Image (tube, rainbow, N blue to C red):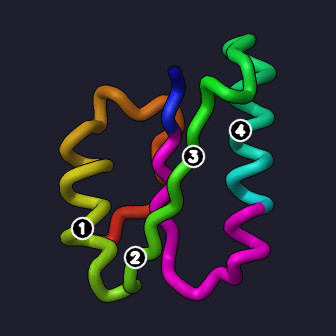
Amino acid sequence: MPHVILKIYEGRTEEQKTELAERLMQAVISVTKQAEGAVSVSIEDIKREDWVEDVYKPDILGNWDKLYKKPGYNPL
């Protein structure tokens, strides 16, 4: 039962978020061979000024060994 959590800067439209969720779901289905009903996707809007404390430090730096795609930036 894959569940994808996407954290992005706020400001995307509902249409953009719906398309992102659909494309992420299709990628998960394609690679994992799971049924569509087994996949869920959530999108969390993050304020730019909160990115470092709310996302970068806990989710990226705090899980560096679990990242399969590491970022090409360092905001610190």
Q: Which mark is residue 25?
A: 4
**What residue sits 69% from the left and 53% below the top?**
21
Q: Which residue is mark 1?
A: 54
Q: Which mark is residue 41?
A: 3
Question: Which of 51 and 32 lies nearest the eye of the viewer?
Answer: 32
Drawn side of residue 39 relative to residue 66, left or right: right
Q: Which residues are magenta?
A: 4-18
Sequence-earlier tag: 2 or 1:
2
Location of residue 13 in the rendering, given as x and y in whole percent from the top left corner: 70, 82
Q: Residues within 10 Å of mark 3 (few under 14, many from 20)?
A: some
Sequence-earlier tag: 1 or 4:
4
Contact, mark 2 vs mark 1 (Cβ under 8 Å): yes
Sequence-earlier tag: 3 or 1:
3
Question: Which of 61 and 29 lies nearest the eye of the viewer?
Answer: 29
**Could you say whether the residue bearing mark 2 is in a helix, strand or loop?**
strand
**Could you say whether the residue bearing mark 3 is in a helix, strand or loop?**
strand
In space, the residues marked 2 and 3 are separated at their CA atoms by: 16 Å
Location of residue 5 in the rendering, given as x and y in whole percent from the top left corner: 47, 48
- In the picture shown, does residue 12 fall above or below 19? below
**What residue sits 80% from the left and 21% below the top?**
30
Number of marks:
4
Nearer mark to the viewer, of 3 and 1: 3
Drawn side of residue 14 relative to residue 42, left or right: right
In space, the residues marked 2 and 1 are separated at their CA atoms by: 8 Å
Nearer mark to the viewer, of 2 and 3: 3
**What residue sits 28% from the left and 80% below the top?**
50
Q: Identify residue type, mark 4.
A: Met
**What residue sits 19% from the left and 70% below the top?**
53
Location of residue 38 in the rendering, given as x and y in whole percent from the top left corner: 61, 24
Sequence-earlier tag: 2 or 4:
4
Contact, mark 3 vs mark 1 (Cβ under 8 Å): no
